[in-house]
Amino acid sequence: MEPHPNLLSLDDLTDGQLEHMFELAERLQADPTLGRDALAGITVGLLFFRGSLRTRSSFEAAVAQLGGHPINLTAHTDFWELEYREGRVMDGRAPEHVRDAARVLSSYVDLLAVRPAPEQRKWAVDRADQQIGAWAKFANVPVVNMESGLWHPLQALADLFTLRRALGRQTSGSSGPRRRICLAWTHSPTPAPVSAAHSLLVAACRAGYEVRLAHPPGFDLDEQVVAQARAAAGASGGELVHATDLHDGIDGVDVVYARSWESLETYGDPTLSASRRAKAGDWRIDERLMARGNDARLMHAMPVRRNVEVTDEVIDGPRSLLFEQAANRLPCQKALLLDLLGRGADL
């Protein structure tokens, strides 16, 4: 059987593929009728092992608007727990293995998009992304990662597309000053996974931006991901800079990307994690901080806790790109589907 393309992280896309997707996304956004029958006869399976608002609705809309048929399945309501580890004696809760479910579903659909649920016990286990890896290994159709423990490539596509539209394309040979982005940790009583922050960090460094990573002590991102981002910045002409507070991180930047993420040092220990977050309760983005930037714009992957992570004034003000950023999920995912399924060549 010939290998099929997957999207488990943005590493699965070359710079040329990304450029082609963004050019196609521009045209799809400008003309919503473009490609409306491109996925005629195509069925896409969407499997959610945890909740989703934007990813589920935008991916389903992308399939439908291109003439395809989406099938949504949600764990614990539409199907049961699945084992993903190989060689297990399956005498526990899971009555079926991913290797069997993936093969069966591959006979029904043309592409599988999966949002797995990390175990949330040990970071060393969840960072391995074994669940999404199992789907990619055993499926006979393309597999798209709709957010795993380590990566959120669909969010990163929309983020890069939004940055390009707001700041222009950044390359190592671009004239003028390098554009600056601050990836800023913000306080939240229930922090988001690190996946969106990881994907944005590597993607922005790969795209040639100067990225400032600002977070309190104890909230470092995965060290291997940071090393990958630093290497990507070196190759693209970008730069990765660490900041110890929001003031230093935001000074002079063009975009503030606000995001709460969990401490990997206290991963799997909710009591200790909550105690650590409480010590950084003042890490919130407001207009006073935004004014320190270079006419800075705000981005956030959402959902956003108003007046905890970011104030209403900024979210609803002229600096905010949040709703444009969320809307950009649709054309980017349309372009991705067309590319993975080989249906975009004639558009």
Image: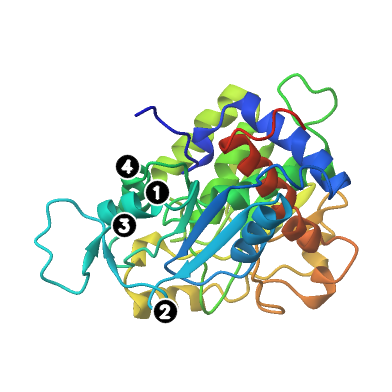
Q: Is mark 2 in CB contact (under 8 Å) with mark 3?
A: no
| C-alpha separation, residue under disc 4 versus residue under disc 2 | 25 Å
In the rendered image, residue 50, in percent from the top left (x then y), is placed at 45, 70
Q: Are marks 4 and 1 in contact (CB under 8 Å)?
A: no
The N terminus lies in which quarter of the figure? top left
Q: How much space separates mark 4 and mark 1, taking CA atoms?
A: 12 Å
Is 226 situated above or below 296?
A: above
Residue 118 spot, x, y in % from top left: 36, 63
Q: Is residue 204 left or right of 288 when viewed as pictured?
A: left
Residue 148 visible in the displayed image: yes
Q: Residue 327 falls in which quadrant of the image?
A: bottom right
Amino acid identity at mark 1: Ser
The residue under label 2 is: 77
Residue position for label 3:
101
Nearest to the observer: residue 215 or residue 189: 189
Asked if residue 135 is positioned above or below residue 164 in the image, the reply reads: below
Mark nearer the N terminus (3 vs 1): 3
Which dot marks residue 106? 1
* Mark 2 closeness class: few <14, some 14–19, many ≥20 residues within 10 Å: few
Q: Earlier in the sequence, mark 3 or mark 4?
A: 3
Disc 3 on helix, strand or loop? Answer: helix
Q: Nearer the viewer, residue 343 or 223?
A: 343
